[in-house]
Image (tube, rainbow, N blue to C red):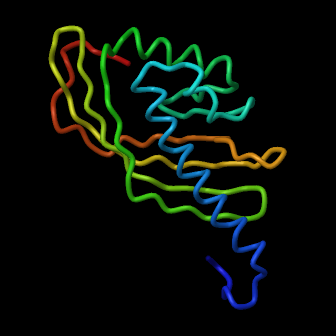
Amino acid sequence: MSENSGTRSVESRLDELESRNEITRLIHEYCHGADKRDLERFSAVWAIDGVWIAGDDPVVGIGDIRATIQRQWELIPDYHHWSSNVVISIDGERATAESDVSVAARFDDGSWARSGGTYLDIFKRIKGRWYLAERDIGVGFNLDPLPEGFEP
């Protein structure tokens, strides 16, 4: 909390705590939706005009985000994400978050690769509910080599 809690109203402090909880849940729902191949769960975290930056070309809008995750599911039969070290900053109806992610992925040839990175997120509150407005995924490391010729 940026201000001294003694100078803020109980309602303001409660709103911040509830917002942090909802944003943290969205970070984890993204992973559960992706890992469990649950398109509705995955889609529910995003703002309609969300931006997903997972490479050179940002994916814009919920329709294209949905199509992109479905293509990933075709390329990578199985993966598991673990988000941690979540730091959230809230400024009115906008929030930012930074979290680390570890990923284990199984490919068509049966091989597994482990990698990780950082999610840099922007959230916005629309009609009282928080949504992921932008996620910029930075790959920080690959512990295992990717299968030869694999291009996500």
Q: Which residue shows up at 44% across the image and 53% down it? A: 99
Quarter of the image where one finds residue 31: top left
Q: Could you tell me residue 96's position as x and y percent?
A: 61, 56
Judge left or right: residue 114 versus residue 18.
left
In depth, the one of 150 and 24 nearer the eye is: 24
Judge left or right: residue 5 versus residue 126.
left
Q: Which residue shows up at 56% across the image and 41% down it? A: 135
Quadrant in which the N terminus appears: bottom right
In depth, the one of 67 and 1 nearer the eye is: 1
Q: Which residue shows up at 39% across the image and 59% down it? A: 85
Q: Could you tell me residue 55's position as x and y percent?
A: 47, 30
In depth, the one of 42 and 96 nearer the eye is: 42
Quarter of the image where one finds residue 150: top left
With respect to residue 94, does 48 lie above or below?
A: above
Quadrant in which the C terminus appears: top left
* Residue closest to the far bottom: 6
Q: Could you tell me residue 86's position as x and y percent?
A: 46, 58
Q: Which residue shows up at 65% across the image and 34% down it? A: 46
Judge left or right: residue 51 versus residue 139.
right
Quarter of the image where one finds residue 74: top left
With respect to residue 46, does 110 lie above or below?
A: above
Numbered label tally: 0
Judge left or right: residue 86 versus residue 93.
left
